[in-house]
Amino acid sequence: MSSRSKKPRTVETTVTYLEMTAHPHHHVPPPANLKLMLLKAEKPPLQYYRYLYDAVGRPFHWVDRRALTDEELVGLIHSANVDIYVLYVAGSPAGFFEVDRQGSEVELKYFGLARDFQGRGLGKWLLNEAINCCWAGNPLRVIVDTCTLDSPAALPLYQRMGFVPYDRKSRTVTLPD
């Protein structure tokens, strides 16, 4: 028997960079008949963050944070500039978003719902809450990016909520085994 090492699988994706230069002040009511709670996770435990990242991002090949060491990741998610909010539906974690404040610019770094909670009308409401959190410090600009590996609904939703594309780039992503 010979063992062959697997060649890492790579895929090409197009990343769209979007910005918002004024708070849109949308009113998006929460979906009816769901017990929702949105909580800021203050210095979340590393394994809990990895769980959220994986639950939301695995179907869309989120790999960037998975490649970080524990120390590198803790340094990012426990930074004074970073806020992480977790959506709970009937007591279960359903999604999260991460806000990274860098002076006059704020980046909506990660945003999404776990697969079991998609299709319930939560995405638009959660994105509106994320946008409000981003604008809380009155930045000059809020940015976000999405790629062709993300949900096909992501880019249109960002645009409906007021984000405008300002750049597109190709990127090669190495997928984990």
Image (cartoon, rainbow, N blue to C red):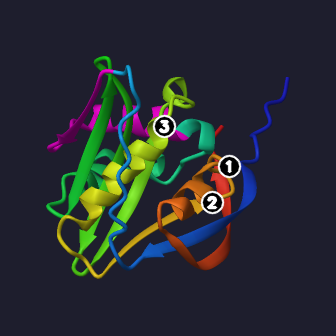
Please tell me which residue is depicted at 14% across the width and 61% down the height of the picture.
Answer: 80
Residue under label 3: 56
- First in sequence, mark 3 or 2: give its number: 3
Q: Nearer the viewer, mark 3 or mark 1?
A: 1
User: Which residue is more in the foreground, 70 or 61?
Assistant: 61
Residue under label 1: 152
Left or right: where 67 falls relative to 147: left
Please tell me which residue is depicted at 42% across the width and 53% down the height of the picture.
Answer: 110
Q: Give how far across and how far down residue 48 sits, in percent.
A: 30, 32
C-alpha separation, residue under disc 3 versus residue under disc 2: 15 Å
| Residue 34 figure quarter | top left
Residue under label 2: 147
C-alpha separation, residue under disc 3 versus residue under disc 1: 15 Å
Magenta-drawn segment: 35-57
Categorize mark 2 by other alpha carbons within 10 Å: few (<14), some (14-19), many (20+).
Answer: many
Categorize mark 1 by other alpha carbons within 10 Å: few (<14), some (14-19), many (20+).
Answer: few
User: Which residue is more in the foreground, 87 or 27?
Assistant: 27
Q: Please say whether residue 51 is one of the residues in the magenta stretch.
A: yes
Q: Secondary structure at mark 2?
A: strand
